[in-house]
Amino acid sequence: MQEITLRSPAFDDHAEIPKEYSHEAGDVSPPLRWSGVPDEAVELVLTCEDPDAPVGTFVHWLLAGIPPETEGMEAGDPPTEAVPGRSDYGGLGYGGPHPPPGDRPHRYVFRLMALSEPSGLTAGLSAGDLDEAIEDKVMTTGTLVGVHGR
């Protein structure tokens, strides 16, 4: 099946994420747009992870329950129906990039997944909850990678 096209009007794939979407600027999620969601999809799930974090992959955003007809979101404004998960900062919702000072810029991988069945996830979900809930339900995905350094 064809991949979802995931992009941001704020930055290009593999380009710098503007500071206004970082942790130090207040954790405002970047605007996102997507296309190519299969008609059969019943739910979308969005994640953002930093695979370059010194402690291993760091979860910056988990968002489940996105209606499949949604085509994007504005900065800091996820769909009202969406279910926020817990980032590795400990809070609900988006936690922006914040690599250690002096590290080379880290990669932030935004991944949108179309599900064939509802995830059943509720607010406060963890990455483990998400992995378990979507196993064998992912129809197709799209990725967007941003980089950020301090």
Image (spheres, helix red, strand yellow):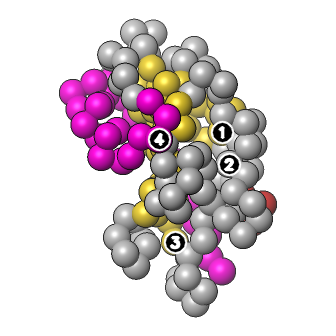
Image depth: mark 4 or mark 3 in front:
4
Image depth: mark 3 or mark 2 in front:
2
How many angstroms separate mark 2 from mark 4 (CA)?
17 Å
Question: Residue at image x 51%, y 58%?
Answer: 90
Q: Which residue is mark 4?
A: 124
Amino acid under label 2?
Answer: Ser
Earlier in the chain: of badge 2 and badge 4, it is 2
Task: Give how far across and how far down residue 112 sits, in percent.
Answer: 47, 36
Q: Which residue is mark 1?
A: 32
Question: Which quadrant would the N terminus be assigned to in this image?
Answer: top left
Task: Give how far across and how far down residue 80 sits, in percent.
Answer: 66, 25
Earlier in the chain: of badge 3 and badge 1, it is 1
Image depth: mark 2 or mark 4 in front:
4
Indicate the quadrant where residue 34 lies. Answer: top right
**Residues at badges 2 and 4 in contact (C-beta under 8 Å)?**
no
Amino acid under label 4?
Answer: Gly
Q: Which of the pair 41/118 is nearer the observer? A: 118
Earlier in the chain: of badge 4 and badge 3, it is 3
Q: In the rendered image, is residue 14 in sight?
A: no
Magenta-colored stretch includes residue 54: no
Residues in magenta?
A: 122-150
Earlier in the chain: of badge 3 and badge 2, it is 2
Check disc 4: other Cα within 10 Å, few if <14, some if 14-19, many if 20+.
Answer: some
Checking the image for residue 106, the label placed there is 3
How many angstroms separate mark 4 from mark 3 (CA)?
25 Å
Earlier in the chain: of badge 1 and badge 4, it is 1
How many angstroms separate mark 3 from mark 1 (CA)?
20 Å
Numbered disc 1: secondary structure: strand
Q: Which residue is mark 2?
A: 29
How many angstroms separate mark 3 from mark 2 (CA)?
17 Å
* 54 lies left or right of 15: left
